[in-house]
Image (cartoon, grey):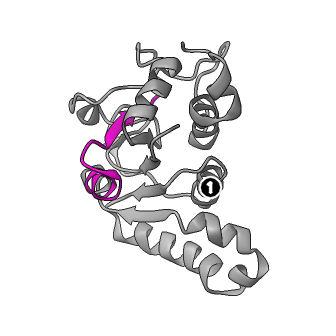
Amino acid sequence: MFCPMAIALVHHPVLDRRGDIVKSAVTNLDIHDIARLATTYGIARYYLVTPAREQQQLIERIVGHWREGFGADYNKDRCQALDLIETVNSLDEAVADWRELAGPDGLPVLTGARHREGLGYRAARTLARQRPLLLVFGTGHGLAPELYANGWPELAPVRGGGYNHLSVRTAAAIILDRLVGEQGRVMPSAGD
């Protein structure tokens, strides 16, 4: 049995294509698609991490439409998925909230497309049975190096046969399926 799991989608600090640390923009697709993904896989919380007040207001407006307005009546399933969302200013705030919710041994696990060695999916599934994980995804061109300095485990990247810049929504779907999906429970997958 898996421990509770959460997702954090970080918009700052992340890298742009030049490698500069930036705040990336929140997108409607990331809000909706990752919330639906999280609901499908039984994820306990979905953190949207941005210190930009304008971006937080955008999240509130989008989520509010589906929770309270016309959207709530039109598509009740979307409302359920968006109920997982918690908007926070920083990854530290997400980690603190996750540990308050899931227990003090809640562990952030970083993800990224860089070709570094990381925790294989078999080892990650074992870890997910022992501790509540917070899967940390970066937007833009990935998480800033300072986040890797925390000593948190890194998940092995999703590797294809060539081009390796998946949308964060696609990478999150692949990773969650490998970790907690039906296939992840019964057989090893790539990265093991």
Q: SS at mark 1?
A: helix
46 lies above or below 177? below
| Residue 109: in magenta span | yes
23 lies above or below 107? below
Give amino acid for label 1: Thr
Q: Can you give x and y, in whole percent of width and height, for residue 32 in the image?
A: 63, 60
Judged left or right of residue 16, residue 61 is right
Q: Which residues are magenta?
A: 95-112
The one of 113 and 96 positioned closer to us in this rendering: 96
Judged left or right of residue 24, residue 122 is right
Residue pictured at 34% horizontal, 58% vertical: 101
User: Hey, which residue is sitting farthest bottom in the picture?
Assistant: 69
132 lies above or below 92? above
Q: Can you give x and y, in whole percent of width and height, for residue 171 in the image?
A: 59, 34
Residue pointed to by mark 1 = 39
Q: Residues within 10 Å of mark 1 (few under 14, many from 20)?
A: many
